[in-house]
Amino acid sequence: MTWLASIGIALRALRVNKLRSSLTMLGIIIGVAAVITMIGVGTGAQARVEEQIKALGSNLIMLLPGSVTSGGARMGAGSRNTLTEDDSYAIQREIREVEAAAPQLRGTGQVVAGNNNWSTVFYGVTPEHFEVRNWVIASGKGFDAADLAGSAKVALLGETVVRNLFGDGDPVGQVIRIRKVPFVVIGTLGRKGQSLLGQDQDDVILMPISTARNRVLGGSIARQRTVGSVFVKIREDADTSEAESQIRNLLRQRHRLQQGQEDDFTLRNLSEVLQAQEQSSRIMTLLLAAVASVSLLVGGIGIMNIMLVSVTERTREIGLRMAVGARGRDILMQFLVEAVTLALIGGLLGIVLGVGGSYAIGHFAEWRTEINLQAIALAVGFAAAIGIFFGFYPARKASRLLPIEALRYE
Amino acid sequence: MESYTVAALRGVSLEIGSGEFVAVMGPSGSGKSTFMNLLGCLDSPSGGSYFLAGEKVSELSGDALAEIRNRCIGFVFQNFNLLPRTSALENVGLPLLYSRCPAEERRQRAMQRLAEVGLAERAHHQPSQLSGGQQQRVAIARALVNNPVLILADEPTGALDTRTSFELMGLLQQLNRGGMTVVLVTHERDIAAFASRIVSFRDGHVVDDQRVAQPADARQLLREFDKVAA
């Protein structure tokens, strides 16, 4: 009995009872579709994290004042105003492994332009900030050392701010008021999209740090040189842990910390944070796939069930086939091929449904999903294996029937 | 629960010549079914031997027996045993599938046999679209398709009415006249009367083995039946 003949017999037998075949396949279809969709969602999430990592650039370190245990004060709101602008300059200047260090002072406030107003976040930064934090200047220009020295009232607006204050109009050259202080818009920032925490990264204004300190924030902040955070970019070829310990030592020295005293600052490696997130989204993908695989398993059990029923129902037919010359082997092949064919057709339909489901989720939930070819191949192989595994027992049962008894079966 | 062996056949010794038309009779439990199963290579004897067309088949394996059945035996059953939702043509070609016959040759040979039993125009009908008599004729065509040595019919007219029974027996007699060996199991004397030899079983033994000089002529009886019915 050639393979082709066996497949022909199997297909004919499946076609004879279309409804039963369809219902049997349902388990496999749903199982395969579930696996593919889940892996699609998981892979999409992973890809997003990877993208963020790439956008971040390699090896970015964030320094915050205050130690972790005291809650990490920022903006000088707490008593621990321990991180200063000069710390940042020192880091850039004295540590070999550091490519650039960018201090940052954060504030919030109402911004007014003409008839529109918008509440947003603004950061006082240095020119290094653009490179260290991967900001692209979309139009206009950035500010320079002169602006910094003179506390110039110039600002660059993020996309969301532009849209809410100026609609489709060009903001460059316009005057806006930030916390009632007039600023000239000298540029706009390229799009960054949503952060991994769901924050709108384009809802932001950048201005020189001196301007923020002296002209906008005022109060005690103006009298000190404290900053809310410092971002440090490590050189590509440098050893990150070496750089981290250098930074730590330098800061401890500058802050005159004794041996045994805690750091009065927090050092966080952002790339590591993202990598941890990537790891956890990878685990999430595996978990989702595992859960979906359970449904695939159930589909396989469904096939076995139906094949057993089918064998029992077709006992007379099996007896007849044996009477006209089918060997046990031929019957085994027939039913095995039937099971595998069911599983494969179900698998293919499941792929179509799974790919469609991935797209649907991507579209409606606005989650990123990716079609993973590996997952598809895996799902098909799994479906075939399930067909063989769960079809084998019924097929063997069929092949072992004695022709006389089978022919007599009511 | 104790299990015990039933000796279905005891010391049966029989010879059936090529071209004979034998009817096997006997009450239930007489061993006639066991005898037919042995004859048809569906079972092997626990003792003794069975020679089919000169070949000793009694000690062959299951697979080998399957091949013997495929090549040498044509079965006809009381309930036709056709594959449902499958065309007559495919039904007739079934044995050829298992002798690895290519598709086109299968189709041709099946078609030929269907024509021989007068059902060429119904080749693509399914069993549900055929009458009882027609289904049984398809079964006979299937039994003939691989040029067997022997046709084994188990109560072939059991599910048919009188007129159709005459038709069918007429077909069997015609095949027998052409040289085919036919062995028939029946409990009806009327049907057994068409055979040229009647073997009777009881309690696992052959109790009677008679040659019939003038077997009934099924075609004749059919003509008479139609005259009366008209």
Image (cartoon, coloured by chain):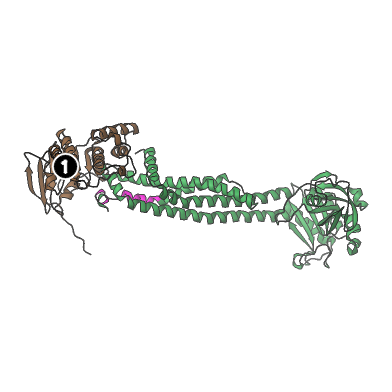
| Magenta-drawn stretch, dominant element (helix, strand or loop) | helix
Question: Image height check: is A333 above or below A279?
Answer: above
**Residue pushed farthest front?**
B230
Q: Nearer the viewer, residue A328 or B97?
A: B97
Q: Please tell me which residue is depicted at 85% across the width and 45% down the height of the picture.
A: A141
* Residue highlighted by disc 1: B229
Q: Does residue A57 appear in the picture of this structure? A: no
Chain depicted in brown: B
Q: Amino acid at mark 1?
A: Ala
Q: Is residue A107 left or right of residue B5?
A: right
Quarter containing the N terminus of chain A: top left
Q: Please tell me which residue is depicted at 14% across the width and 44% down the height of the picture.
A: B191
Residue A294, horizontal then vertical, whole percent = 50, 56
Residue B193, horizontal then vertical, whole percent = 11, 43
Q: Nearer the viewer, residue A404 or B171?
A: B171
Mark 1: few/some/many CA within 10 Å (<14, 14-19, 20+): few
Chain depicted in green: A
Q: Is residue A156 left or right of residue A149?
A: left
- Name the image quarter holding residue A218: bottom right
Number of callouts in the render? Answer: 1
Question: Image height check: is A107 above or below A173?
Answer: below
Magenta stretch holds residue A393: yes
Q: Does residue A247 appear in the picture of this structure? A: yes
Q: From which residue to which does the magenta span run?
A: A391-406
Label 1: which secondary element: helix
Q: Nearer the viewer, residue B204 or B198?
A: B198
Residue A302, horizontal then vertical, whole percent = 43, 54
Residue A72, horizontal then vertical, whole percent = 77, 64
